[in-house]
Amino acid sequence: MTQAYSDTWLEWPFLDESHRALAKALNAWCMQSLGDIDESSVDQACRQLVADLGAAGWLRYCVPSGPDGAYGGALPELDSRSLCIVRETLAGHHALADFAFAMQGLGSGAISLAGTDAQKRAYLPAVARGEKIAAFALSEPNAGSDVAALSCAARLDGDDYILDGHKTWISNGGIADFYCVFARTEPEAGSRGISAFIVDANTPGLVIEEMIDVISPHPLALLRFDQCRVPQSQLLGQVNQGFKLAMQTLDVFRTSVAAAAVGFARKALSEGLVHAKGRQIFGGALADLQLTQAAFGDAATEIDQSALLTYRAAWVRDVQKRPPTAETAMAKMSATESAQGVIDRMQQMFGGLGVKRNHPLERLYRDIRALRIYEGATEVQKLIISRELLKEKKG
Ligand code: COS
């Protein structure tokens, strides 16, 4: 039997047998387990998804395995290609499932990269089992793209740090068990005066000030730190090195945002193809029209371009073992921007149905939008790529 074209990407040289097996096994699990998700409460739906993904073992790809498996991960190191395969596959089934997986990884990523052995043992196994929900708290009302301008303060008081300030757009805010919080430990020192902390959700002084409703609803909150006392043992990595830790964490997880975008785009194309073959118009099938065929030609090519950039970036980190900063930024920018276009074009083919509430294309149209913004907007990715190039050419 000839292989379906839409599966051939799994044969690309960036991936190995373990990735191919992972994609197939996860896809089979999704078909069985992600059919009926009760979304009447997104908070409850996400808690349940984290528990289910944990029980099935998929969250083990969010953390490293550690000595004698002590950190609970599937592999010795975070493997970007596995993270991408999981997100692309989940995104092709349900955006909330992708979200639940992604945030376990991003929310604990700074611990995986820079935590002490004790911190890793305390948090990572529970993240991998789906028993602790993780969150990454970097953005502030006045510091999003310009994140070095953040002002949430952490000052040393005896053996504790005291945190004061706000964090916003915090995914899993309100349902998380702990937050990796980036706060200013050195006033006036810009990016060199930021440190990271693990703050347990029940710490007095950590207040969920507002739950934020967005077009593709998921748990999202504005947090307030009000004299929030955190022991020094919760400092994550070196003092004043938090900005670099945030950037390194994003270098890993931004690639997986690109993969999720590819998953959404593939789903849109697949829905469009089925629809165009069945829909009768002007005495034939919608698929017979050259305008329809042109849309498919563009969509399939853009999806492969994005997927190639995505798995190239993941491979650079996993196999070449060098920081994939520029490659990741290219993948994130290209995949999220082009997925929005692919989804829009496929939605157009459905006419009125495509904008009907909860039609698969209507959902995808909303689900993709935030990916062009979160974990570094497209405009920031352009800056990152260009800085990497200019660094090489000293004027
Ligand atoms: N890995 C390691 N170190 C990095 C790094 C990376 N990917 N990127 C930057 N750094 C280091 C730099 O080398 C520099 O180090 P020194 O102080 O030793 O010179 C330091 O961090 C500051 O870097 P830079 O000068 O480039 O910082 P800027 O303030 O100009 O910020 C951007 C650069 C815009 C790229 C950064 O703020 C950014 O990524 N913003 C988007 C943030 C984001 O994704 N927000 C969403 C939050 S999650 S939803």
Image: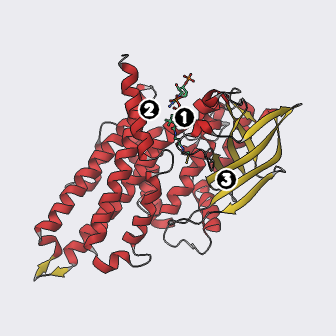
For label 1, the residue is 247
Identify the residue at image location x=43%, y=63%. Answer: 93
Identify the residue at image location x=77%, y=44%. Answer: 164
Contact? badges 3 and 1 (CB < 8 Å)? no
What is the quadrant of residue 315 in the picture? Answer: top left
Say the numbered circle drawn on residue 373.
none
Residue 171 placed where, x, y %? 60, 54
Contact? badges 1 and 2 (CB < 8 Å)? yes
On whether ligand 1 comes within 8 Å of the CB at mark 1, the answer is yes
On whether ligand 1 comes within 8 Å of the CB at mark 2, the answer is yes
Q: Vertically, is 280 above or below 27?
A: below
CA–CA distance in space, label 3 to label 2: 27 Å
Residue 200 placed where, x, y %? 76, 47
Label 3 element class? loop
Residue 297 placed where, x, y %? 18, 57
Residue 315: tell me if it is visible: no
